[in-house]
Image (tube, rainbow, N blue to C red):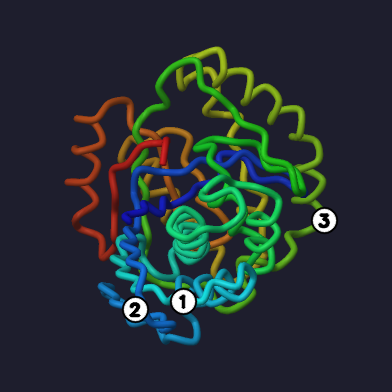
Amino acid sequence: MKVRCPARVGLFISAGKGLFAKLSLCDELELTALTSDKVELELESETPIPAEANSALLAAAAFRKAFRVGRGVRIKLVKRIPVGSGLGGAASDAGGVLRGLAALFETPGRGKVGAELLALAKKLGSSVPFFVQPHPLCLVAGKRFIQVQPGGSIPYLVVAFPGFRLPPGEGRADPSPEAVSVGLTRKSHLDKLVCSLEEGLSLSRWEDLLFNRWEESRTPEAARVGQVRRILSRVGLRGVRMAGPGPSCFGFAVSHPDGERVLGTLREYPWRVFLTCCGG
């Protein structure tokens, strides 16, 4: 069984609520049931991932224990989402394993996303349930996932991972009080953003509504991430924002050829850059 594990960006991230989109940039899983009780892993990744930190293995072990699955599984994981990029790759891999194993083995719901699978996902990490639920674009508010259905196509995105990683806890540090205040005042912008997307309005009508509270964080690495954002804006991308709490940033291209042009321009930087789209 093959499973796609999409990257994720936040179109709006505020305290306690956000709008998140799955991307066509994906890791790939291939799951094969075994007659033995072993869990085997074949990993293709530019960056080594220790077994004790591999989210796919951890998810498989948790699934087999929770649902009392006696058979083993072979996991082939091809990593295309850069490790440490802040694009949700590890959480997506864990969610993909849970979804795949639920379909592969005789378990409650057999592949359907129910309360038991979401509860298990939450134990593996706060971001994992997003990758278990099926919606490619949704509002996340606490335990609720509310599907957002765009009235038209969302423009192509260029996503840039600058290569450096934020120190542990750096991206998760609380922003300044001023930043939290700004986030609270912009909550009404989230409603406007959702309505604009559902009505299929053009990028020019909603690009200024995008928001990420982490951009106001007062940390030493914030200046480096800010420089990435300025470069993306300078090469012509629109609505440039941090993708989440990590170092990656994204911006919208006005067309696919324009996105290809931007990729060519950004080759002078030692980054990993992707032209992708919303939809997972």
Q: Label 2 belongs to which residue?
A: 41
The C terminus sits in image quarter: top left
Q: Position of residue 178 (x, y in %)?
A: 79, 51
Q: Secondary structure at mark 2?
A: strand
Residue at (35% x, 81% y) in the render: 40
Q: Position of residue 217 (x, y in %)?
A: 66, 60
Q: Residue at x 35, y 74 (%)?
A: 34
- The amino acid type of the residue labelled 1 equals Leu
Mark 3 lies on a secondary structure that is: helix
User: For the residues marked 3 and 1, what is the alpha-carbon distance in whole angstroms?
Assistant: 39 Å
Sequence-wise, the earlier of marks 3 and 1 is 1
Residue at 64% from the left image edge and 70% from the top image edge: 66
> In whole angstroms, how far apart are the C-alphas of marks 3 and 2?
44 Å
Residue that numbered label 1 is attached to: 57
Task: Please give the name of the residue rendered at 19% of the width and 55% of the height, measured from the top-left corner.
Answer: 267
Mark 3 or mark 2: which comes first in sequence? 2
For label 3, the residue is 177
